[in-house]
Amino acid sequence: MDDTLLLNVEGVKKTILHGGTGELPNFITGSRVTFHFRTMKCDEERTVIDDSKQVGQPMHIIIGNMFKLEVWEILLTSMRVSEVAEFWCDTIVEAPSEYQRETWNLSNAEKMQAVPLLHGEGNRLFKLGRYEAASAKYQEAIVCLRNLQTKEKPWEVQWLKLEKMINTLILNYCQCLLKKEEYYEVLEHTSDILRHHPGIVKAYYLRARAHAEVWNEAEAKADLEKVLELEPSMRKAVHRELRLLEGRLEEKREEERLRCRNMLVSTPPPPPPPFMVSPPSPPPSTALRQPPLSPPPTPAPATTQTPPHPPPHRPLRIHRTAGTGPQQMDGLAWPFPVQLARIWVSLFKI
């Protein structure tokens, strides 16, 4: 017998009784493993609990599916082909009353017994301010009742009894949502209840509070008026919520007024447009103005005559007159100094 090996898994030891062949297989997800097994107690007699060879049929599992017990995959993926090994697995056996069972693992009677316990635990946690834990208890109780309700005929006596219990738990759950500021989820749940059961006062009251938190003034007031209509004894609570609503709305209006006032004060006036100075334009002059373009002339029939020479270009002349008066150019008064006149002449000559 080989030495005992640890598989890096707490509570699992392995001893190889007969070595396998080849390398360790690549157990990818979806691989099918077929094997024989024998399960024994760790007592002096090594009492056999189960033996596949006695049954006459090997067992097989699919890797990745965590079939029955997760430990099976841990054991098998450490073995080679034709290997025989012995494993020690530490297990803890608890009676059903010694551990908390999952909701899906309860019988119908156990689910019905668990609902008031979960309801009471949720109420206790809510009073302690542990709203997340309280909402989890309410949800678990709702799941139990929904599961039981699916086995009843809709709108029959037992179905309606379960429906009433479910609505109570949902409204408790909505109170937790209000504390967690999940207002739109409250609106969704309460509206769904009122769609099927329009006479539940608590649903109107919680929906009014959610409307007030999201600034739906008209809807909040309408729901509070419905509460007062259905339950006149809640007059004080309704008036308190209305005062809180008006106070919050007034604070919001004041904040908006201050915001608008600050925007007007802090916004500087727009700067004046910059003063633009355009360069002086020359006075109209027939001597410097280009003649308007005329349509091209109709070409004359081809002849052998030599075309006439173009007229010579008339040079522009600038004359300086005596004194400090304006300069003269081709006999016309020019109101600029000679230097500017030269610039303009050069531009027009181009």
Image (tube, helix red, strand yellow):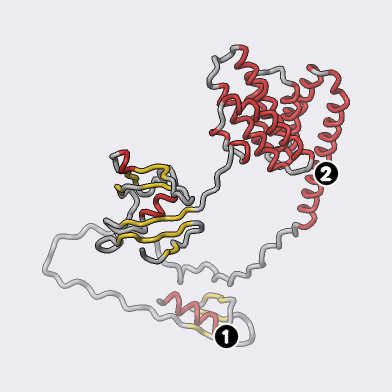
Tell me the element at label 1. Answer: loop
**For residue 11, side relative to residue 174 (left or right):** left
Asked whether 296 or 6 is in front, the reply is: 6
Kind of residue at disc 1: Thr
Is residue 70 visible to us here? no
Q: Is residue 28 above or below residue 279?
A: above
Query: Residue 259 in the image: x percent, y percent?
Result: 78, 49
Kind of residue at disc 2: Glu
Query: Residue 95 in the image: x percent, y percent?
Result: 59, 38
Q: Which residue shows up at 75% across the image and 25% down it? A: 202
Tell me the element at label 2. Answer: helix
Asked whether 208 or 32 is in front, the reply is: 32
Label annotation for residue 254: 2
Would you identify the image quadrant in which residue 69 lies?
A: top left
Q: Is residue 221 above or below residue 297?
A: above
Would you identify the image quadrant in which residue 250 lies?
A: top right
Q: Which residue shows up at 11% across the image and 69% down it? A: 304
Q: Which residue is mark 1?
A: 321
> Can you say which quadrant of the picture contains the N terminus?
bottom left
**For residue 29, side relative to residue 106 (left or right):** left
Sooner in the amino-acid sequence: mark 2 or mark 1:
2
Q: What is the spatial separation of the Cα atoms under label 2 and label 1, in whole angstroms?
A: 79 Å
